[in-house]
Image (cartoon, coloured by chain):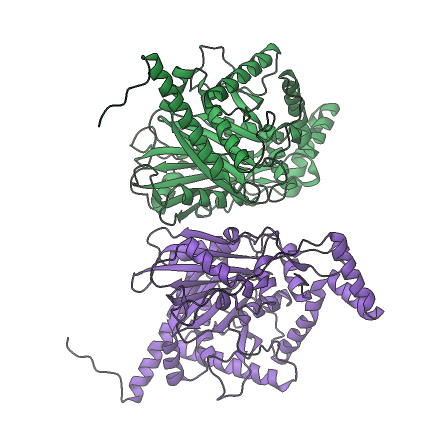
Chain colours: A purple, B green
Amino acid sequence: MMDRMSPLDAAFLQLEDEEPGTSLAIASIAVFEGRAPSTDEFAAALAGRLPLIPRYRQKAREVALDLGPPVWVDDPSFDLGYHLRRTALPPPGGDRELAALMGRVMSARLDRARPLWEYWLVDGVRDAGTGEERWALISKVHHSMVDGISGTDLYRVVFDATPEPGAPAPDDWHPEPPPSDLALASAAALDLLRLPAKQARALLAAARRPRALGRTAARTARGVASLAGALVPASRTSLSGALSGHRRFALARGTVDDVRRVRSALGGTFNDVVLAAVTAGFRELLLERGEQPAPHGVRTLVPVSVRAPGEESIRDNRVSLLLADLPVDVADPVERLAAVRARLTHLKAAGEAEAGAALLAVAGGEPFPSIAAPVRLAARLPQRQIVTVTTNVPGPRRPLYALGRRLVEIVPYVPIAARLRTGVAIFSYCGRLTFGVTGDYDTAADVWTLADGIERGLAELVSAAAAQEGEEEGGPEPLRAP
Amino acid sequence: MMDRMSPLDAAFLQLEDEEPGTSLAIASIAVFEGRAPSTDEFAAALAGRLPLIPRYRQKAREVALDLGPPVWVDDPSFDLGYHLRRTALPPPGGDRELAALMGRVMSARLDRARPLWEYWLVDGVRDAGTGEERWALISKVHHSMVDGISGTDLYRVVFDATPEPGAPAPDDWHPEPPPSDLALASAAALDLLRLPAKQARALLAAARRPRALGRTAARTARGVASLAGALVPASRTSLSGALSGHRRFALARGTVDDVRRVRSALGGTFNDVVLAAVTAGFRELLLERGEQPAPHGVRTLVPVSVRAPGEESIRDNRVSLLLADLPVDVADPVERLAAVRARLTHLKAAGEAEAGAALLAVAGGEPFPSIAAPVRLAARLPQRQIVTVTTNVPGPRRPLYALGRRLVEIVPYVPIAARLRTGVAIFSYCGRLTFGVTGDYDTAADVWTLADGIERGLAELVSAAAAQEGEEEGGPEPLRAP
């Protein structure tokens, strides 16, 4: 089996080539209850589902003479043992140890000579809350693969909706013999011959400069940015600039109930509350670094619902991406939330006023697409227009399982590149809200300040909501003797 | 502090550049008794010894216009936390898990933008024999650094000769500001101007083609090879050919007493017995792969003592490297040992007959140099002349300690490159003999067959020695009723 890579996917590989040391894999950490399966047990289950994702046994192959974008070809020496690795956290196996492992795993580029994915089974994980023994699965998949398979790999190959594992898929995979360079080039040339001359020239040009395709998207983005009055270049901060080849990771947690409580007391959408918490984190990070949190200091790509008010729901995946300045200059948590809310409402209105202003609308049903979308877009925006990415993925509300073990939480990972030194990914599952914070190793060594600041930001809003509830119920709760 | 890299060291960096996916770090696993130190505790001890090895805080910097070899410059953003990592083995924490970790760690190239070393503290190690809890330290150092510091890093920065840790070294390190490209180029140009024209041209040429310096060594090697009658190209086997960018690792064990017992019953030097065991491993590997173990099938670089008979001792580091065909075609263990012995005696005699035939003679006192030497040489030999490297390093006989914990064993790692798909490194310490087996991930997936074959090979010789002892004492020991 062999198929042509989409120019957008090809652009992702090229972007990685152009930026030495950058890895454009996306990832998540899935933490499970119970005894970890043995490597053989897990490998057998995984092998039973591989037929559902052909890409997992294919590799990217360049076409000679640049006659077309790379193609996906079967990997005749596919070896599941290479892709499935096993490791463990050093004691105490907490968030710090998990994050350190994640930073190392994500610093390394996926090997282009093989299918572009790795799964890491992790032993020795302890639940951050209860201290119970857990195990984790890190799934690391190249960005260029995620588009073709809609990002639902984990749902297809690992997760079950019930404790009873699903049946293996029938597998009649026999790798096609690798096509010769000549065959690939000939096929690409034939395709071009069949097309009208003008179209062929355009395709050829696109294959040779896949990033050019992105320029249209960038123009659209600039259009939206100007509509939204964001023409001011983002203020210079330590948040953007050259990157090292290594990454750090940190994580923060909240609950969906926290967000609900804040919304019902203080107003705003789910997204507004989450972004207000992220804003608090960036404010703390800048203050800690001795920098002034300026109004245009933290411009981020944010996902917003494009549905009309009243139609929003956590499960809604029809999101649009807009550029927004996070109000890091506002010191008061409640005012900060109000500022986020006003800004996003304004941006959405501006976006909706112009047909086609929504940069990206993803149809529902697929849980992971918007992790990928902001990064793709960020890489094509003018560098001074954006300093970070914030990606918020509503996940499933019902429990999921792998080999009969219940999934406790999912921590998402967003890659950084193109002078963005930090990125925040947000995921909700079964009432749990997790923030994955990516930072450049050298220039964002303080990723935990950002992560802890996000947690504190949410906690402050919950306190403010509690105070508000108290007032509404007739003043704060009186202190009682113990 | 800044100093010029030796052309030989520079050649090593260039060799890595020319062979994509190859990593030329050397390494060892040191396994310790007792409770693992905390990362902070270990980092503090390590920091106290860094002044002893300036290279650990320097990075390689290219000189513009190729006016000279790269220089070592202080790394102003040196961060010990980057170099010292902590991980753990998944249960059961045995040799398989340790070797899998080692394979992954050694597959990754050291980051050229930083000092070229990494130490990995490993939790969750279990003693292969007793099942007791252990911890390990993987030290990974680039080949280009090892020459300058004589390979004794671990002895300087980690090991103590007593359970009482040594005092930290005084440290007045202030990184020199990084020299500008212009300054570096000017300094190199000035150096050239000060030299007689002919010498300057030669130096410039050498800097531009550092591998050319290696050609002299290769010519010497070819000289020795022809002297030794080894002009026949090595037979084609699966042991040499293109390499993938990933490595596997396996290990085997014996005791110094095993070797002594074999020597006293069957004759031969320490080296002869060890090589006979390695020969058994390669024979088993080839048979398992369905290949004929041919007389010229496994040509290896082997270290031999250049002292006269009677002067040999395990502690003797004055070794020479010779090319030898391992007698993998001989089925009987005792005959195989005799063949190894005859061959090495012949090679040594041939080598000694010609002045300068000894390829490399290292003065005593430094415990690690010969790990590096064979690899350096192998990279410069004609490809068909060699199929593997075998490097035998006699280590200390007295116990060593780190932070008061006793060192149990050291497992050495030899890198592979230049079409060599396997390599075996041998180390002895306190009566323990360890074999580290490196293999290419794709084409030597069966490294454990080689490692297990080496263990079996030594065991067979011990059995043969026991039988011989029995005969000498008047026939085999009669069976007694229990």
Locate residue B42 relative to residue B18 in the image: left or right: left
Q: In percent of the image, x 48 and y 81: which residue is there? A: A341
- Residue B161 or residue A329, whichever sits in front: B161
Query: In this rendering, is residue A349 above or below A93?
Result: below
Q: Is there any visible trace of residue B152 in the rendered image?
A: no
Q: Residue A73: where, in percent of width, then height?
A: 65, 58
Query: In this rendering, is residue B228 above or below A356?
Result: above
Q: Residue A446: where, in percent of width, then height?
A: 44, 58
The quarter of the picture where residue A306 lies is: bottom right
Q: Is there any visible trace of residue A52 in the rendered image?
A: yes
Q: In percent of the image, x 50 and y 42: which residue is there? A: B248
- Residue B153 or residue A292, whichever sits in front: B153
Query: In which quadrant of the rendered image does the C terminus of chain B lie?
Result: top left
Q: Residue B342: where, in percent of width, then height?
A: 53, 15
Query: In this rendering, is residue A9 above or below B217?
Result: below
Q: Residue B393: where, in percent of width, then height?
A: 46, 26
- Residue B67 or residue B465, whichever sits in front: B465
Locate residue A5 relative to residue B264 in the image: left or right: right
Q: Residue furthest right?
A: A197
Q: Count the marks.
A: 0
